[in-house]
């Protein structure tokens, strides 16, 4: 039988994503791909995959997956989820897995990922990747068109996700010692391309107000709740191209940040564009989270993009051997900051 992970429970919204389907926007086909490239690349680095290897993007609540292979190596990057490995067929026991650390699972075991806590997204990579045929050069799922991924849709109970490897390599496990996934205090934007379609007050509101992420957000766009942005004489323009992170403002004045599954053209004015380096952090924001913006120039946006790309490229070199159980180094524990502070029982 083909080695696979069988979906016992699909989670809230679990799809196969890589770094996207580039080169087809002129045909009306979105790039798609991971909302959080940092999480995707990190999970792949820990299991030894190339950065853009397809992995499972997990939104809010993770799946339960049964191992139908001799063995498989996995790693998870993202929110602070409870990650459990349960023995098969009702056997007692089980173990917890740490995020950003690889683990070898055996046939019959069930991997279960719980709620992601304060992050909207997590990524599960498997050593060697999933054996799904690329569509237009990418494994990414674009569910609105039934394109790519696994049957062009989110996972369902009973699906079998084929694996490229029947068993995991014999080697020690790896880990990333740290990964900063905290959102910045303000999401940085470059004004334009249609900021002249907004009044001075509308532009000030974008930078001075605090917005909330709407529960109506999805992979196409993040809808924001808060004060309306004032247009200057109308809200319809001749449709033009949509860049990742474009902040489109329809007639109600409430901004929509366009994400991975965005339409390729649009006819509402775009007041600003989120810089590429901040898009992964934006994608991790949960419904109800607060969001504020700060304006930067193009030169700063380009410099941050180069810095961000260099950080992603360096992630595989940061993977080290994982220490578990009796192999834990006491000296390393002594120099680690295991508590965030102390309090006195005597002071009031």
Image (cartoon, rainbow, N blue to C red):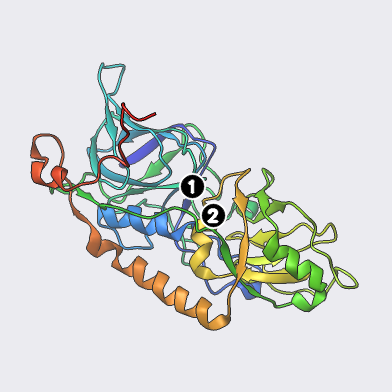
Of the pair 183 and 276, the residue shown nearer to us = 183
Of the pair 200 and 274, the residue shown nearer to us = 200
- Residue 277 is left or right of residue 40, and the answer is right
For disc 1, the marked residue is: 121
Q: Position of residue 256 (x, y in %)?
A: 70, 58
For disc 2, the marked residue is: 283
Q: If the image is split into quadrants, where does the C terminus sit? A: top left
Taking 156 as reference, is 21 above or below it? below
- Residue 240 is left or right of residue 317, and the answer is right
For marks 2 and 1 on the same chain, the one whose residue lies earlier in the sequence? 1
Task: For mark 1, give the secondary structure.
Answer: strand
Q: If the image is split into quadrants, where does the N terminus sit? A: top left
Category of crowding for the residue at label 1, using alpha-carbon neighbours closer than 10 angstroms: few (below 14), some (14–19), many (at least 20) = many
Q: Position of residue 342 (x, y in %)?
A: 30, 37
Q: Position of residue 327 (x, y in %)?
A: 9, 40
Q: Are marks 2 and 1 in contact (CB under 8 Å)?
A: yes
In which quadrant of the rendered view does residue 39 lie? bottom left
- Residue 35 is left or right of residue 225, and the answer is left
């Amino acid at each position: 039988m083909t080695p696979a992970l069988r979906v016992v429970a699909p989670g809230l919204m679990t799809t196969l994503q890589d770094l996207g389907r580039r080169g087809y926007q002129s045909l009306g086909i979105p790039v798609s791909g991971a909302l959080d490239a940092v999480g995707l690349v990190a999970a792949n680095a820990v299991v030894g995959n190339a950065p853009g290897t397809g992995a499972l993007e997990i939104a809010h609540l993770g799946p339960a997956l049964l191992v139908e292979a001799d063995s498989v190596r996995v790693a998870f990057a993202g929110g602070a989820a409870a990650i459990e490995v349960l023995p098969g067929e009702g056997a007692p026991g089980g173990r917890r897995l740490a995020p950003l650390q690889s683990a070898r699972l055996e046939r019959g075991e069930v991997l279960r990922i719980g709620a992601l806590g304060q992050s909207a997204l997590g990524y599960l990579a498997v050593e060697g990747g999933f054996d799904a045929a690329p569509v237009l050069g990418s494994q990414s799922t674009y569910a609105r068109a039934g394109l790519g991924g696994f049957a062009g849709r989110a996972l369902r109970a009973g699906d079998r996700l084929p694996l490229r490897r029947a068993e995991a390599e014999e080697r020690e496990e790896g880990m990333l010692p740290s990964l900063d996934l905290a959102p910045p205090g303000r999401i940085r934007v470059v004004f334009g391309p249609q900021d002249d379609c907004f009044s001075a007050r509308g532009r000030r509101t974008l930078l001075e107000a605090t917005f909330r992420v709407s529960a109506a957000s999805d992979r196409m766009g993040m809808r924001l709740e808060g004060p309306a942005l004032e247009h200057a004489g109308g809200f319809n323009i001749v449709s033009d191209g949509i860049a990742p992170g474009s902040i489109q403002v329809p007639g109600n004045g409430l901004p929509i940040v366009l994400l991975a599954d965005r339409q390729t053209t649009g006819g509402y004015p775009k007041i600003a564009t989120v810089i590429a380096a901040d898009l992964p952090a934006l994608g991790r924001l949960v419904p109800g989270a607060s969001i504020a913006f700060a304006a930067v120039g193009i030169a700063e946006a380009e410099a941050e993009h180069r810095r961000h790309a260099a950080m992603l490229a360096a992630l595989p070199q940061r993977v080290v051997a994982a220490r578990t159980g009796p192999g834990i180094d006491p000296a390393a524990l002594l120099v680690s900051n295991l508590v965030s502070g102390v309090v006195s029982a005597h002071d009031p």
